[in-house]
Amino acid sequence: MNKIRQPIFDQICVVGLGLIGASFVQALVQANQDTPLMRRIVAVDSNERSIRLACQAGLIAEGHTDLSQVAQGSDLIVLATPVQSIPKLFAQIHALSTLKKLPEHCIISDVGSTKADLLQAARQIFGQHHRFIGGHPIAGAENSGFEARKGDLFVRHKLILCPDNHSDAKDIQKLQALWQALGADVVLMSSDRHDQVLAYTSHLPHLLAFSLTHQLAEHDDNLDILRYAAGGFRDFSRIAASDPQMWHDIFLANKTAILQALDEFSAHLGEFRQLIHQEQSQSLLAWLGKSRDVRRHFGHMLTSHDTSHHSSTHQDIYMTNQSYHIKPAQSILGTITVPGDKSISHRSIMFGSLADGVTKVSGFLQGEDALATLQAFSDMGVKIEREGDQVVIHGVGIDGLNAPNKPLYMGNSGTSMRLLAGILSAQQFDSVMTGDVSLSKRPMERVAKPLRQMGAIIQSTGEKGTAPLSITGGQSLTAIDYTLPVASAQIKSCLILAALWAKGTTTITEPEISRDHTERMLNAFNYPVHSKDGVITVTGGGRLTACDIIVPADISSAAFFMVLAAIGQGEGLTIKKVGMNPTRTGVIDILTLMGADISITNETVVGGEPIADIIVKPSQLMGIDIPEHLVPLAIDEFPVLFVAASCAIGKTTLTGAKELRVKESDRIAVMAEGLTTLGIECEVLDDGMIIHGKGKAGETTAIFGGGVIESHHDHRIAMSFAVASVRASDDIIIHGTQTVNTSFPNFANLANQVGLNIQVIDE
Ligand code: S3P
């Protein structure tokens, strides 16, 4: 799997081994082990000791106090010295390139805090066709110098790149790729915009901290007054302890933007003064209240991005990648049990935690999604013991949750985040929820909006109504009447949960029936929820009583094996004790309509949920128009149903399934991409897909070719294409299969047990 790739750069020369420069070098060396970034690093610093230490630490190949002694041959020079020294360095670099000691394509960048002045200097020294692209990592630490370096300083921090109109697109891409490999979140903006933004968010606050500290010092030559200064002064003035030379340079370099920000600030301060002078109590309170809300919100954003609090937020970047290498298989045979239902497992933890008494759960899904919910409730002080699929929850009662001391990490799990949004909106404490890359792209306003109508204060702080979610506690919620804009069990459940604390009776109307585990389980916990003809009512103010939960096997996981048995040869499969809740069995209805040979036996009811064994035999499938009313009842099964449709005779059409676009991935686009790779003709619709099945009467030959598939952080995409291998002519490689652990930890083993040929490769 480890393809040999060319590094992005041949030699990187870093000028300045202070905190930022040395951290950059350290991060480059670390990241170079995974992604080839450069062949060699050299460094320049006026301090010989730093160079010696960097050489000893194996960070640089060579170093010198004089740039002209080591920079030659570099195709990237990064200046990490004070802003004011940079024009001089530009001149030295220019001299080197005139002597042809630098390749023509050598890019020059920096890490300084001002950008427009440097761009101007670059234009003056190198001309219009300069190759300077300024960079500014929004990261730092109070300590300085080589020894303070941190290899993860840039992880999850913004890195602003400031190209100009003449910058080469390839140069921008290379720098972007380099910083992204160090974990930074790269943003492009013009130099002028950068300087304006930074004037407000960094330079002005520093200036004010210096100014107030200076003012106090003027009051009292002995600094005696500081004896009486407490937390307020300490917090406000912390940044005035920064390097004076550096700030002197920045204030002069960004003079125009800073003066503008300062003038605005003075005017604003004048207004504040006026409010106090005229004792305009109402307005003063409103001003202060607004600032408090903004600052609180910002505090949430900060904690949710603060990686030091939370090791698992590193997960997206450092999580080991896994892939499946699958050889074609044909014959399928066996009797299997698939893991516990994901939806029910989530809810068992939530309701068990909020109940009075001890709840025992058996058959709990030990997948990452359900474990994220479990972890969240542990973080809120609930004692939860787990041994394999047996869980004991010591309920804390409806008002017993405690404030978590860090953001709650929901991983890949939309259900955890959306349902918890309902619970957290009603708590007395503030909270923040974060998720992985896939979850951070999924729409959260669909729950935030109705929650706000109930009186919640909830912000989707991501860029497009997405996570992290920041929730302000201490609100009292009121019941609402709400018609769901889409059939979604997650929105419905979120609102039912918020309604438990709301004053009055909440009424939720569903456009179509979606899974009803929340309603069923709340009733089992002795909390009445009424549901009739798609209208659900629940009254706030009650309590939950602990009860034991038996989690049935997940029909959504069984679906992969149902399709596998139907499209494969051999004797087929028996899948034991699968949850048969009528709001979940759409996949059986659809496969049956397609002509699958499915029989259901041993039907019983366990813990309020119907269960049965499902027997599926090899079948001649026919293309169909999937009835739209079945869509919400099979919402998670379409990826694997598309695989079934590819093996059917004739065309299968799915419509009315726009929701698939906002699942763990855009399942319409991503499935179409993978199916096309494997040689299936399909047409993408806004709300579904048309698949031209390649099945032929009486034939069980290969339908799919071989190919490389990307899972796009979506477990069900990965598992669906693994199923396709039973009708493939060649090897299928699926990248990003680590996400399968979110819902089906044992999938590859179980699939191999019944006849597939999956090799799991950790990369
Ligand atoms: C779920 C509801 C569905 C489903 C998800 C689990 C639940 O999502 O896709 O896997 O447990 O409530 P939507 O409610 O967004 O359709």
Image (cartoon, helix red, strand yellow):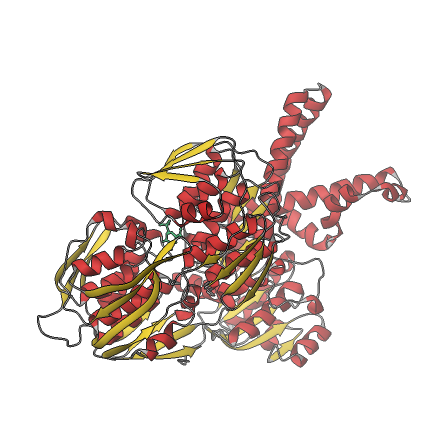
Residue at the image position 45 percent from the left and 63 percent from the top: 365
Q: Nearer the viewer, residue 531 or 448?
A: 531
Residue 268 location in percent, x, y?
63, 30
Residue 402 location in percent, x, y?
63, 48
- Label count reads 0
Q: Is residue 649 left or right of residue 662?
A: left
Quarter of the rendering occupied by the N terminus: bottom left
Residue at the image position 31 percent from the left and 58 percent from the top: 667
Q: Nearer the viewer, residue 297 or 83?
A: 297
- In the image, farthest residue toward the left: 697
Q: Is residue 130 left or right of residue 704?
A: right
Q: Quadrant of residue 663?
A: bottom left
Q: Is residue 750 left or right of residue 539?
A: left
Q: Is residue 189 left or right of residue 205?
A: left
Residue at the image position 47 percent from the left and 62 percent from the top: 364
Quarter of the rendering occupied by the C terminus: bottom left
Residue 514 seen by the camera: yes
Residue 333 location in percent, x, y?
27, 78
Q: Nearer the viewer, residue 213 or 352?
A: 352
Residue 297 location in percent, x, y?
58, 42
Q: Is residue 104 above or below residue 625?
A: below
Residue 109 seen by the camera: no
Q: Nearer the viewer, residue 334 or 406?
A: 334
Residue at the image position 26 percent from the left and 75 percent from the top: 725
